[in-house]
Image (cartoon, rainbow, N blue to C red):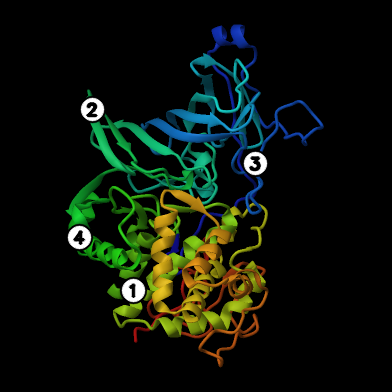
Amino acid sequence: MSHSPGPRPWPPPRTGRHRAALAAVSMAAALTAVGPSSAAGRISASAPGTSKGPRALGIGDPLYPNLGNPGYDVSAYDIAFDYRRADRPLGTVTTIAARATAPLRTINLDFAEGSVRSVRVNGAPARFTAADEDLVITPPSRITTGDTFEITVRHTSDPRDAANGGWVRTRDGLAMANQADAAHRVFPCNDHPSDKARFTFRITAPRDLTVVAGGLPLERVRKAARTTWAYRLAHPMATELAQVSIGRSAVSRRTGPHGLPVRDVVPAADRKRLEPWLSRTPGQLAWMEKKTGPYPFETYGLLIAGASTGFELETQTLSLFERSLFTGQGLPRWYLESIMVHELAHQWFGDSVAPRRWSDLWLNEGHATWYEALYADERGKASLERRMREAYRQSDGWRAAGGPPAAPKPAEPGQQIGIFRPIVYDGSALVLYALRQHIGREAFERLERQWVLRHRDGVASTTDFVRLASEVAGRDLAGFLNPWLYGAKTPPMPGHPTWKSAPKEEAGTDAKAGRKVRTEPGTRAGAGGGARAGAKPGWLSTGRHPPHPPVKPE
């Protein structure tokens, strides 16, 4: 994720997690066979061992303890949406193929912002109910360890509460922004990046609209005034990275390195205006491949949406960007290209190699910020060393506000996206800079290539990164990296003994508000994306996480 430049309105903060209204309708036959199917409204989760009633589960992620569910591994999702209008719920059928990793009397799925009509397990009607933001399913027969099973959920997917993430309302339709905990506001799932799966999307919409999703097209079937579009991703994907775009869009196609199909989706009226930006992608792909090895997926492109989100997002194979980023803001071309590179770099770091836990987020955002900064540096536009020096100056303040890079503080209640703080952007890129200073450029570049190759299509942790770095360097680096990753104070920077970290009150970080106030123009050391040309000192950012401070090319 990268933040867009400039102050902008942002939806009001969450006041609590919205809950699914799991309502059974028109199921007389099923009710006779299996008993009551659901209970409308909230059902409180029961503590382990204190009740036999349904309860919400999680896999114990320190930052999002209620996300994910134990006992099974999803292998594939097949999701069919029926779109009528952007202000109405979509009729949806989600089919999940999974394998049990433990005996299962009940199966929990993460789900909110929708109503469930029916559930089947292996083709047979199943009982279901709600427990907080979980859909709790009781299959007709117990599932044993190693069994494969299929769940089909008929439900609605409601785009009307865009403030909570998931669906994003655009000028003429919808797009998705599920990071970090909002995929289950769109479809029932095991909503944690550690459980990646294959995805197929089937979307039926009015025939005058264009529908694009991640992956490559399978088929398009027209029937009367409606068209059904189908897409499939060739590689496993985390739920937070799903993307579906519905609207009056134009699709531009070009070819990237090694014949890679590059597909961009833009508002139809802006196709010519945006073409100069889109044409930069093949060159950026070639640049990234020189740094990290072959592009890991079957296609890539930009989805430029007519929406005000306050961020850009690395949805797999089709990165989401705000239209306003490229129109009418007067930002330098080199700067916008570096933001494009930020989201592109995520395809390797965060998408192909997903975090095992959300506290490993620094591996995603730190690397994307690193390549964003390196791209600008190599083009002679903004010095990498200068940016890292400024990040070092502010690092202690960022650590105090948000925790160290690999042990971030949980977000405030009702502010789940609050983990996207400066420390996981420039504060984490600073760790990579220190590592390169310590082991040398050649070893560092070898590490980067081996990291994305070894963990391609998988998940990896901070421990995995430290282990591989030690292997590549030929010596144990835990003693060096652990203070950088977990320390409350920023360690000395190798090769730069005079660099100092300022007290947090001088670093411009408002720890309580989770925001950053820029006090000195002309430098950039914020969080992962966005600058505002001509901004004045004291500019206060808003949004998911702080944007970069004002920038001056060098």
Lower position in the chain sequence, tag 2 or tag 4: 2
Q: CA distance from mark 2 to mark 4?
A: 29 Å
Q: Residue furthest right?
A: 50
- Point 38% across, 70% down: residue: 372
Residue corresponding to mark 1: 375
Q: CA distance from mark 4 to mark 1?
A: 21 Å
Q: Amino acid at mark 3?
A: Gly
Residue corresponding to mark 3: 58
Please tell me whether mark 3 or mark 2 is closer to you in this view: 3
x then y, percent, for residue 261: 22, 50
Residue corresponding to mark 2: 221
Lower position in the chain sequence, tag 3 or tag 2: 3
Residue corresponding to mark 4: 275
Of residue 410 and residue 260, the one placed in the foreground of this image is 260
Q: Residue furthest front?
A: 474
Of residue 421 and residue 355, the one placed in the foreground of this image is 355
- Asked which secondary structure carries label 1, the reply is helix
Q: Can you tell which quarter of the image residue 312 is in?
A: bottom left
Of residue 32 and residue 343, the one placed in the foreground of this image is 343
User: Quarter of the image containing the C terminus?
Assistant: bottom left
Lower position in the chain sequence, tag 1 or tag 2: 2
Q: Amino acid at mark 4?
A: Glu
- Disc 3 crowd, CA 10 A, few/some/many (<14, 14-19, 20+): some
Please tell me whether mark 4 or mark 3 is closer to you in this view: 3
- Asked which secondary structure carries label 2, the reply is strand
- Disc 4 crowd, CA 10 A, few/some/many (<14, 14-19, 20+): few
Please tell me whether mark 1 or mark 2 is closer to you in this view: 1
Q: CA distance from mark 4 to mark 3?
A: 44 Å
Q: CA distance from mark 1 to mark 2?
A: 42 Å
